[in-house]
Image (spheres, rainbow, N blue to C red):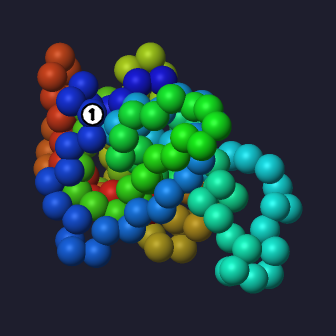
Amino acid sequence: MAAVNPNGLVIVGDGETPRIFSAAVALDVLAGEFVYVSGTQNNLTSGADSFTTADITVKPAVNPLQVNGMSLGSVTSGTSQYVAVLRRGDVIARVIGSQTGGKLVEWVSGTTPGIRSIISGIYAVADIGSMGWMGGAIGRGLTDATSGTNNYTLISLNI
């Protein structure tokens, strides 16, 4: 999979409250690539004293409904290979389809992954819970953009 920006991770701001976690890398990841948590289940105990960074492993995201953050660095998988993962901040990402500022956004996988608006109309709050695709919301658009050769948008990542 490819990063959503050819320049890798491009952070414009973090709102002074970044949300970052560290994780072991199960497959190679690129800076600016969306990742998901994948690994051994039932490997935690009830105490924080036994928790280690290796208890969380990440892989490049392939499903829009399974996105846990954006990789802050390019890391090759292997023993003792770790990456920081951004869960909150303002980043520049490629647009796939159209993106309207203020609307919820989702990550779209494929040969050329990118960001697009989720909602193309107005929905009542009660409707949102019944829409399975709403589970792919990763933040909100901060600028308008449409897909094309080099069209990008600023999104407020909030996972």
Question: Is residue 104 visible from the viewing direction of this image?
Answer: no
**Does the rendering let one see residue 90?**
yes
Tell me the residue at 68%/80% (across/down). Answer: 48
What is the three-letter code of the residue carrying label 1?
A: Gly
Instruction: Pick whichever, 76 or 128, lies toward us.
Output: 76
- Please identify the quarter of the rendering in which residue 152 is found: top left
Q: In the current view of this chain or complex, which residue is farthest to the right?
A: 42
- The residue tagged with tag 1: helix, strand or loop? loop
Percent x, y of residue 4: 32, 32
The one nearer the camera, 5 or 73, is: 73
What residue occupies the far front of the structure in this picture?
80
Front residue (pair 77, 138): 77
Q: Label 1: few (<14), some or many (≥20) within 10 Å? A: some
Q: Residue at x 48, y 24 (%)?
A: 1
Question: Is 33 situated left or right of 136 in this image?
Answer: left
Q: Position of residue 135 (x, y in %)?
A: 56, 56
Q: How many marks?
A: 1
Query: Badge 1 is on which residue?
Result: 8
**Residue 98 on image: x %, y %:** 26, 36
Vertical side of 10 occupied by 97: above or below: above
Residue at (35% x, 46% y) in the render: 72
31, above or below 135, in the image: above
